[in-house]
Image (spheres, helix red, strand yellow):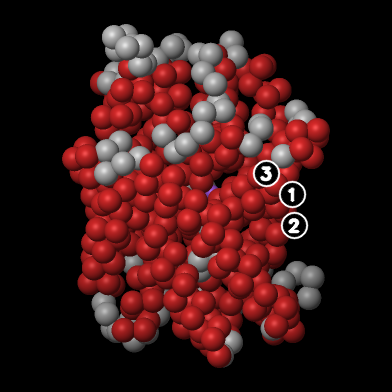
Amino acid sequence: MSAEGVRETWSTRIGFILAAVGSAVGLGNIWRFPFQVGQEGGAAFMIMYLAFVVLIGFPAMLVEFVVGRKTGLNTVGAIREFAGGAWKYLGGLFVFIGFVILSYYSVVGGWVMRYIVGSATGGYVGPPAADGTPQAAQYFGQIAVGWDALFFHALFMLVVIAIVALGVQRGIELGVKIMVPAIIAIFAVLAVYAFTLSGAAEAYSYYLSPDLGYLLENWQSIVPAAAGQGFFTLSLGMGVMITYASYLSEDENLAIDGGSIVVFNTGISILTGLIVFPILFSADVDPGDPGAGAIFVSVAEALGGIPFGELVGVLFFGTVAIAALSSAISLIEVVVSYAIDEFGVDRLTATAIVGAAIFVLGAPVTYDTVMVDLYDILAAKILLLSGGILLIVLVAWLHAGEALEELEKACVFS
Ligand code: PHE
Ligand code: NA
């Protein structure tokens, strides 16, 4: 219960769906997805990823919805009510994962904000250094660490805190009603633009024609990458969808909601590929470069070599920033709702304290970009996967009957 004793709810069903789409669509689709595709062999990765999203991601989302709506509680309270014994610690794990993910997510979100400025001023465009390092790489090296990165990490967290402090309806719901349509509209325009570029055909075939031989040879690395990306992109395995579904009233059709969210999120990922890969191929930039920074360097390098690069850069990074913010608010909300429900703190205090703690946890990430890769592997391939799998075991296996009953409430097929 909040300090006033009344728990908030979404004002409309579409508000809930947009909030969940806003959470799902984020740096996972735009920053993480292209570098996973690039590292894991292009279209070979795409098949596993799509299979994973449909066969495991969608049911896992319903599992979270069921727990959230049935209990109407934050993720810790919800899981404690759902199952006793040692299971109650799973909710604590979720809150912990929320801290870890947002701490580096915000640093990357800060880079994105910095790149809006960089695009407008042409900061990453220019001749290479004496030793041949491209300007785009030098620029990234300067802004991704140190005071610059710390400042933009703080700025990103301040915006997140400001939105979430306003509450479920006046902050999160209002925010996503503006942000999600903006993301879709601008990305559609950018994809049309990318289609006109010289490298488009080559990019589409790299990205969309699967090489089964490659998949069979490399499945040991492709499968965990696709699984981790599947959970990450759908915001699963740490209670975001539990928390968001806990703000629902009874009369929702969870299966249809979940299906729309998965379709939207996958659509945006594919759309991102249709923007990013033609831009890279048109500027002869290799999409296979590994690592968290590669996509920033390669997109920036490519933007310097295509028509209207500055404008496209501002639009692109602006949209990415919006997408990152709409995901970040869901990450912090997991922790904030826990603090409000369990400790009776008011929302403003909870958001400010949690936000400040996350800023501190993320600060070391601005010391060296390799920290982003470390936090990211820990978060996506270890924490989210374990959290997601444990929750599926708990709900879909140990409590299948209750879960199905809850799912069928107000469903068209019941
Ligand atoms: N789904 C978000 C993205 O793709 C990231 C995220 C992961 C958000 C886990 C919440 C929980 O960017
Ligand atoms: Na996503």
**Lower sequence index among marks 1 and 3:** 1
Of the residues shown, which amino acid type is indicated by label 1? Ala
Q: Which residue is mark 1?
A: 51
Give the residue drawn at x 36%, y 21%: 136
Q: For the image shown, how many numbered marks are present on the structure? A: 3
Earlier sequence position, callout 3 versus callout 2? 2
Tell me which amino acid carries mark 3: Ile
- Give the alpha-carbon distance from disc 2 to disc 1, as whole Å: 6 Å
- Label 3 to label 2, Cα distance in Å? 16 Å
363 in relation to 298, above or below: below
Residue sticking out furthest to the bottom: 85
For the residues labelled 1 and 3, the Cα–Cα distance comes to 12 Å
Disc 3 residue lies near ligand 2 with CB under 8 A: no
Which residue was labeled with disc 3?
Answer: 222
Give above or below for 42 relative to 356.
above
Q: Which residue is mark 2?
A: 55
Kind of residue indicated by mark 2: Leu
Question: Could you classify mark 1 by the number of other residues whose Cα lies within 10 Å: few (under 14), some (14-19), or many (20 or more)?
Answer: some
**Residue at image coords 33%, 81%:** 2
Res. 198 image quadrant: top right
**What x and y, as percent, mark residue 234?**
57, 55
Quarter residue 160 falls in: bottom left
Helix, strand or loop under label 1: helix
Rendered image: mark on residue 358: none
- The image shows residue 356 at horizontal and vertical percentages of 23, 61
* Marks 1 and 3 close (CB-CB < 8 Å): no
Image quadrant for the N terminus? bottom left
Q: Is residue 169 visible?
A: no
